[in-house]
Amino acid sequence: MAVSTKRPGGGAALPSRDEIAAFFASATGKVGAREVARAFGIGAAQKGALKDLLRDLEEDGTLARRGRRISRAGQLPPILPVTIVARDKDGELLAEPLDWDRSDGPAPRIAILPGRRLGGRQRPAGLGDRALLRLDRRATAEGGYVGRIQKVLPNERATMLGVFRSHPAGGGRLVPVDKKAAGRELTISPGDENGAVDGDLVSVTLAGTGAFGAKTAKVRERLGSLTSEKAVSLVAIHAHAIPHVFAAETLAEAEQAKPATLKGREDWRALPLVTIDPPDAKDHDDAVHAAPDDDPGNAGGHVVTVAIADVAAYVREGAALDREALERGNSVYFPDRVVPMLPERISNDLCSLREGEARPALAVRMVFDKNGHKRSHAFHRVMMRSAAKLSYAQAQAAIDGQPDDATGPLLDPVLRPLWAAYSALATARDERGPLFLDLPERKILLKPDGTVDRVIVPQRLEAHRLIEEFMIAANVAAAETLEKAKSPLIYRVHDEPSLEKMRALGDVLASVGIKLPKAGALRPSLFNGILRQVTGSKHEIFINEVVLRSQAQAEYAAENYGHFGLNLRRYAHFTSPIRRYADLVVHRGLIRAAGLGGDGLRGDATSADLAKIAESISVAERRAMVAERETVDRLIAFHLSDRVGASFAGRISGVTRSGLFVKLAETGADGFVPAATLGADYYRHDEARHALVGQRTGETFRLGDPVEVRLVEAAPVAGALRFEIMSEGGATPGRGRRGAGRASEARASKGAGGPRKSKAKTPKGRSRA
């Protein structure tokens, strides 16, 4: 869409705050400072004053910025599609925008006003329906939106996913996979099973309401059996419509591909590049090498080479392989399977940098000084041969003095030079000051039958950081090369935190006695300073979580607004074209920019073309992240389903008006504690402090607090866990905890397991803040 640039009222004077707000309310398309200046006829002499005015409007919350794009804060269009999601305490319907980006925060709730009777045969709207809504600009008492339904839309949500559970007499029931629908099963009448058997994952169409108000459904399609080995990820695959079966045309194209030859390539097969990956990796798309620089003018410097699988040699733009890779956007990694972006013939064979086998690669050779600052770089199209396939632990053990048969011969000629170069790059990294968040990442280990064996926190090794630092350097070099060639490209961008999130962070930090500086530009060093203040304290995990939540979500874009988290001005993904489509586009751009072959980016490709691709693959990435997280939730819920009634140590990971989310220390599993089960008190949501506070007692449950919980219910199919708090909350500063003992006694007798003989105990060492 074109941006509306009509100057309200004409003239070239600096516009008023109200005029700018009105302009953004009516503008369509992407709008930045340039469009504002053009719309109001503002010349170069006034641009500084305009930027100051726009900054003031951002600071007071009138406008919101995302990169170079500016919009009216919280603005929704006057007519929009919505999903009806709930009822308020008076029974009135509440809706949310149908296509809301959750990375921008929770979706706004829209109260639905009673309106005129809808014409024709349209039925009244109800929960789960989609509708076209016209907003009424009057705010509700809580500052939200209100609107009237114009049209009830065809209800695609009438299709639901779930697991079929058969009944001996015929028919059965559907156990929904959606967490929000957990516990609300549907009845499937005899004859409506469509061949489904017990344990099948099925999609159903809602049929109506049966006897005694029970919702009924008919099986529409059988999607697979959850009784088979390693099938839990099937739920997420179908729930999020992740493409997972390659088209026959795509597979045929992959099978017909012939190995690349030396034609048009430099022969680097004698260079001892090595791959360093997890021990269970099946595809290897990056290899590394380092050596001291022999240039007398760069004493103590290093030459680092990063070679990346040449996927562009096999996946030609516009071909079947390319079209399906773009649709998938990225590979999706579940604990029990991988849904690859490319068929195995490409990803695990022709493009995988296997030990001892010749493989085509696109390589970048970078020269660094002794302090890790890059002096120069150049891209090459090569034929390489990996000298060794190493795991992170294997390479680290060799450096730590425990080489094995594979790493022993490589220690001095290959591994020590890699670590020497990394030491220099790490110095430059620390000088640059990227955001450093220390949050443990858990990994699920499965048994042969696909169920959970155990959950571990893999050790973070220096070998991991070495590969990460080399890949970041290669990605920066790719972006610099394409910018210098004036080639369109897809950046990996990460915006700075919004003013709204910074205000919320300031409120939380104030609650633990940390002052957030109000002046100066936002930089990762600001957050790193905060994290250093809490290192080793009782607030460490809590503040790490809060800082993480304050950050924007990284994405792909054809316009560059930098990478805040890495503290880099330009950054483009180049190092994983086997599993990320963005990297493949960057490879093609480099091939064209450096004149490395005829299979580069199309000569007529524009930034607008790449912007569409960037938007598509950003959506695919978010889809994959949600699907991966939900699959982990389901696996853990299955794992804990036979431990209902057991107690666990955990930490409050989320606070909402309706209750607490708790993350278990043992498995990292997330579960919910309804506010109604906390005790006899009424618990008020203190949004600024991320806490639920007892109105009479002052008993406080805050984000980050350690707690002990009892597992009350597990819904494995939905991946949902429900807990009951066993430990007491902390005290509200300045109030004490009047009556908290009575609240805990009420809590002890209110849980699903019935009254308990003793009062809930308080684990030792718990924060009382």
Image (cartoon, grey):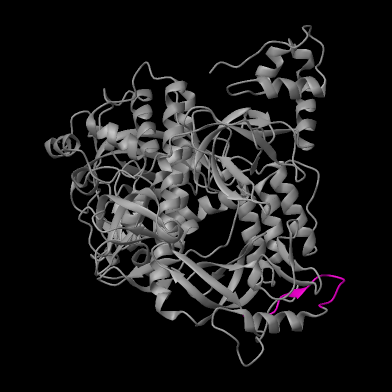
Q: Where's residue 79, x and y in %?
A: 59, 28
Compared across the picture, whether 468 is left or right of 537 comes to left
Q: Residue furthest front?
A: 211
Tell me if I can see residue 387 in this picture.
Answer: no
Q: Residue furthest bottom?
A: 757
Vertical arrangement, residue 43 with respect to residue 143, above or below: above
Tell me if I can see residue 549 in this picture.
Answer: yes
Q: Residue at x 22, y 42 (%)?
A: 246
Q: Where's residue 106, x and y in %?
A: 61, 47
Vertical arrangement, residue 765 with respect to residue 88, above or below: below
Q: Residue furthest top?
A: 11
Examine the residues drawn in magenta and state their main secondary structure: loop
The one of 660 and 68 positioned closer to us in this rendering: 660
The one of 605 and 63 positioned closer to us in this rendering: 63
Q: Where's residue 764, x and y in %?
A: 66, 85
Q: Residue at x 26, y 53 (%)?
A: 192
Q: Residue at x 80, y 70 (%)?
A: 732
Compared across the picture, whether 639 is left or right of 39 comes to left
Q: Quadrant of residue 692?
A: bottom right
The one of 211 and 645 positioned closer to us in this rendering: 211
Vertical arrangement, residue 6 with respect to residue 362, above or below: above
Q: Is residue 336 magenta?
A: no
Q: Where's residue 280, x and y in %?
A: 29, 62
Circle count: 0
Compared across the picture, whether 362 is left or right of 5 comes to left
Q: Is residue 733 magenta?
A: yes
**First to last magenta residue range:** 726-737
